[in-house]
Amino acid sequence: MAVINRIAGFADEMTAWRRHLHANPEIGFDCHKTAAFVVERLREFGITQIETGIAESGVVAVIEGQGAGPCIGLRADMDALPMEEITGVEYASQRPGKMHACGHDGHTTMLLGAAKYLAETRNFAGKVVLIFQPAEEGPGGGRVMVEEGMLSRHAVDQVYALHTLPGAPEGTFETTPGPIMAAVDTLHVDVIGQGGHGAFPHETRDPVIAAVAIVQAIQTIITRNRNPLDDLVISVTQIHTGSADNVIPETAYINATIRTFSPEVQAMVHRRLREVAEGTAAAHGVRAEVRIDVGYPATLNDAAKTGFAAEVAREVAGSEAVIADRTREMGAEDFSYMLQERPGCYLFLGQGDGPGLHHPGFNFNDAVAPVGASFFARIVERAQPVNGGA
């Protein structure tokens, strides 16, 4: 088996959907127009069980199969990023400062393609729940949809999601059992000193020197407190302080992203960040106020569901086009909240060469949309066969 013929037959329609979405990006929880477009398509397919307004603008649709059976969930994210587009394509973003630079327009399109096929054929038992989620890029629409009871309300048994992967060969799949993406937390440090004239530093308590020392000391957590066999990233991404060349400022601000897989490593890092920042600040005669925002948990694939998903991917793309033991990465994903509640699998779908994710020149490859839609459709048919058949 390869790409499903019926899905290949409406590939041009899928391209039109995707390019409409690309031209009209929305950010965060404010995906109302995107949701309206999704609902309009779903109704065209004859799907009547549609729930809106979950996590403000999320959509959940149910397709009933043939007879009683379990329930499988398929998820696509809908939100874009706050950045300017430079692709130059005719369907480029029409909304300044907003861009689909992470392929969520393609993810939504692939799930719509699967929905169209599944609504026509219904060659499965039980039901499928289509999850169109806002705010994956932050602050976590997946978490809110779970908290609002979406999975339990529809008795979802297992969940799957796809994410486009630039740089990987077109139409290939990559996944792995266990952790596939990291937990992400955010560090904020306010360094509070005493400002004054730059010509009289002895009359001040300089937060700039302390901030620089804190940033350098943070790196010792990786080299001296972490087991070398554990994955950990601490990247300081912002330092803000000062306003003039002859003024020692009153305060400085440090911002960093923290990426971990293990809860034990995460707890150690949180403890040491406070100790390092507060201790280094005290050594410089200033004070550090530390806040750590706990973000998305690690994305953990269920081993059995991952093996099953890889089998389905091989049916769609061929054995040589599937990597089922890819190296985990330090990016983060809020599908993790759904995987905390239900077994399932998160996979990457190669889209060929081109600019990477979150790049202003990124553009989803429409040629792979039928591949992703076929995977979604086939995993439903395989997971919930009619009369127990294959």
Image: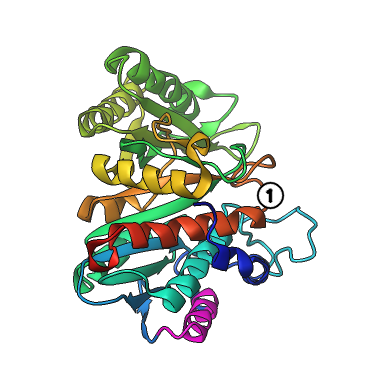
**In the displayed structure image, the side of residue 133 where residue 243 appears, left or right:** right
Q: Residue at x 32, y 63 (%)?
A: 73
Q: How far from the left and from the top, in percent, is residue 108? A: 51, 65
Spot occupied by residue 336 in the image (x, y as percentages of width and height): 32, 49
Q: Nearer the viewer, residue 359 or 17?
A: 17
Q: Is residue 212 above or below residue 59?
A: above
Front one among 34 and 374: 374
What amino acid type should be assigned to the residue bearing mark 1?
Answer: Pro
Pointer 1 residue:
360
In which quarter of the view is residue 268 placed?
Answer: top left
- Quarter holding residue 138: bottom left
Quadrant (top left, top right, bottom left, bottom right) of the C terminus:
bottom left
Residue found 41% across the figure and 39% down from its top:
175
Indicate left or right for 374 with 74 as reference: right
Point 41% across, 20% down: residue: 219
Q: Is residue 155 left or right of residue 234?
A: left
Q: How is the image coloured?
A: rainbow
Q: Is residue 355 above or below residue 203?
A: below
Is 158 within the magenta? Answer: no
Q: Is residue 354 visible?
A: yes
User: What residue appears at the point 37 percent right and 57 percent down from the top-left corner?
Assistant: 379
Q: Position of residue 99 (x, y in %)?
A: 63, 59
